[in-house]
Image: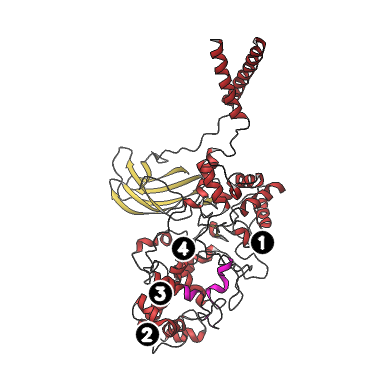
Amino acid sequence: MRRLISVASLLALAALALLGGFGEPQFSDAEKKTIASLALNTLPSLKPDTTNQYADVPAAAALGSTLFFDGGMSRDGTVSCSTCHKIDRQFQDDLPQAVGVGHTNRRTMPLAGVARNPWFFWDGRRDSLWAQALTPLENPLEQAGNRAAFAHYIKKRFGERYERIFGPLPDLSSVPANASPLGSDAEKAAWNAMPTGQQDDVNRVFANIGKAIAAFERSIEPEQTRFDRFAIDLATGAKPEGNAAFSPEEILGLKLFIGKANCVTCHNGPRFTDNSFHNTGVPPFDGLPPDRGRVDAVTQVEADPFNCIGKFRDGDESACRELRFMVKDGPQIMRAYKTPSLRGAAYRPPYMHAGQFSTLDEVVAHYSKAPPSVEGVSEVHPLDLSERERAALVAFLKTLSD
Amino acid sequence: MASIWRYILAGLGLAALLVGIVAAVYLTLPQPAPGPDLSRSKKTANGLFVASFEPERGVVRQGELQSWLLTLKTAAGAPVEGAAITVSGGMPQHDHGLPTSPQATDYLGQGRYRIDGVKFTMSGWWQMRFAVSAAAGSDSVVFNIVL
């Protein structure tokens, strides 16, 4: 009997040691669940885009790829999508504000996983990838072209490829060389002089350009990082090996990210974004025109003839629920900008919608301090993180890039 | 030999005492504050209706546009037809509203209304408020949803 009690007591002691000492788990079950929800292996496969019937047509993606890198797709023949979306730089340009034909007022966004966005640009002023792709083509500061000129260019350079995908090109013989409802006064006048049917023909070719470019961009997806390897090992109970193992500083950073620092509130899911818009008190960039973010984008996306409700959408209107149920007013969309993905962020300073911060340290310091917004109300509250905590967060963010 | 066992036993006794203390401390720790009322069916503020709010497909998925069903009955249990419903809400702890503008889009019969365009973009405590106007009068109800 005494021996039995001794054995039982020994077992109890062993259990106590496991619970209280060297076997202490690094993450709680709730933390583990959150970490697993951020790992890339939880990213679902890309859904079909019913608004673009060519989205998964290989020939369309191939033509889109050609157009993406073609400087001929601009007024001066030198600027392509790839001028700012550089293939060897995560499809961004490292500049505080993009420079095309002119100097824009927004930071170029990287493209990994872009086809998964419900909204496009920092302010969400477009509601589909193909409608987004059309916008820089006619922006006088980006590619600065006009849709009539693009239709002529497509016919001349890529007519055969275009027709194999989209069917016969319309008769463009009486379409002016330069015309667009968004162009210069002369281009607008030329556009307004065109019969409606001819405008539709040109718009259709223009929309198809966007659909081809979007088909190509759907192939640009995020890649596995050190964090993902760590998260998978944590979920499966395997011991992280090699660079999948996190340093104590990186573990602290991860714990802060999903805990005290509240980063995961908005930077959630395997893309580290909630795909929504928030005012986080990011200051304006000196010298740029006033920028109110989402609040001004609402009217733009509603007015866009290439939006989901417009006649150039393929499929039915059931795909348009984001647009149909979007928030159109209220204080929360003033100076609200899209939550960017954090994957790869460590290697692409500067940060924020106009490149306001040049390092991740500055970004983390901003969120720790949480200054009020110059307009509207910031959603973030001061965290008062210590220097060690801020450095740990930056160390963790780097694991999303390696 | 016997003395070693005695030492071990003494150690075990001390350990058991420690376990007891730890357990007592653990059990007497202040319990976390009770969360918001999460019931999916409740009386409206002035008791005019009984409202239930459920995701149409049964599960709540963070970050997805979903449709929910709001079922309205009178206090006597009769379905409420022809109700005008407005939807609002947000996250009380973050001082912000809903990321979308959900609307009552369809009447499905038996007092059931489809509320489409519901999206919860982050984990945490959300509130959905419904202002309901029907033949019996106007009333409102708030549902709490915690993700």
Are both tags, 2 and 3, on one chain?
Answer: yes
Q: Which mark is residue A195?
A: 2
* Pointer 2 chain: A
Inspect the image, locate mark 1, and give the three-letter code of the amino acid beneath it. Answer: Phe
Residue A61 visible, this orientation: yes
* Pointer 4 chain: A
Q: Which mark is residue A357?
A: 1
Magenta segment: does it hold A370? Answer: no
Q: Nearer the viewer, residue A44 or A108?
A: A44
Inspect the image, locate mark 3, and give the three-letter code of the amino acid beneath it. Answer: Asn
Front position among marks 4 and 1 = 4
Are both tags, 3 and 4, on one chain?
Answer: yes
Q: Is residue A317 above or below residue B66?
A: below
In the displayed orientation, state which residue is furthest to the right.
Answer: A387
Which region shows up in magenta?
A65-89
Tell me the residue that label 4 is attached to.
A115
Q: Nearer the viewer, residue A251 or A122?
A: A251
Q: Is residue B46 above or below residue A267?
A: above
Residue contact at pointers 3 and 4, CB within 8 angstroms: no
> What is the distance, in whole Å, between disc 1 and disc 2 at their CAs?
49 Å
Q: Indicate left or right for B66 with A265 as reference.
A: left
> What is the distance, in whole Å, between disc 4 and disc 2 at their CAs?
34 Å
> What is the distance, in whole Å, between disc 3 and disc 4 at their CAs?
16 Å
